[in-house]
Image: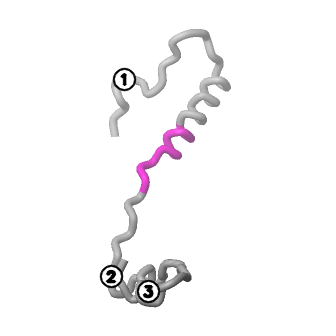
Amino acid sequence: MTAPETPLLRVVRGNPDDAELAALTAVVAAAAAGARAPEPAPKRDSWWADKASLVRAPLEPGEGAWRASALPR
């Protein structure tokens, strides 16, 4: 493995000591580790096995509601 030709971090102003550079490197490394791409959603195995279809809409009482309960939404 070869070293990169351009540095990953470059101090533009000031004269930081070794401890300050180490702290800066740790902060940048932690930010880069937390900025991973989100994982894709898992694929559905089967629409037949989906339990969400068992959840129904809330009941709406009223005149003729029993007729409307059999109609598709």
For residue 3, above or below residue 61? above
Residue stretch in magenta: 29-38
- What residue is at 33 percent from the left and 35 percent from the top? 2
Residue type of the residue flagged with mark 1: Thr
Query: Which residue corresponds to mark 3?
Result: 69
Please provide percent x and percent y for residue 67: 41, 89
Classify 36 as above or below 54. above
Q: Nearer the viewer, residue 46 or 24?
A: 46
Q: Secondary structure at mark 2?
A: loop
| Amino acid at dot 2 | Trp
> Dot 2 surroundings within 10 Å: few (below 14), some, or many (20 or more)?
few
Q: Tell me which residue sits at (60%, 28%) in the image.
A: 24
Image position, residue 51 (x, y; %): 44, 83
The residue singled out by tag 1 in the image is 6
Nearest the viewer among 59 and 21 is 59
Residue at the spot 34% in from the left edge and 25% down from the top edge: 5
- Queried whether the magenta region covers residue 45, the answer comes back as no
Q: Between label 3 and label 1, give the one nearer the viewer.
A: 3
Front label number (2 vs 1): 2
Residue identified by numbered label 2? 47
Camera-side residue of 47 and 3: 47
Residue at 38% across / 69% down in the picture? 42
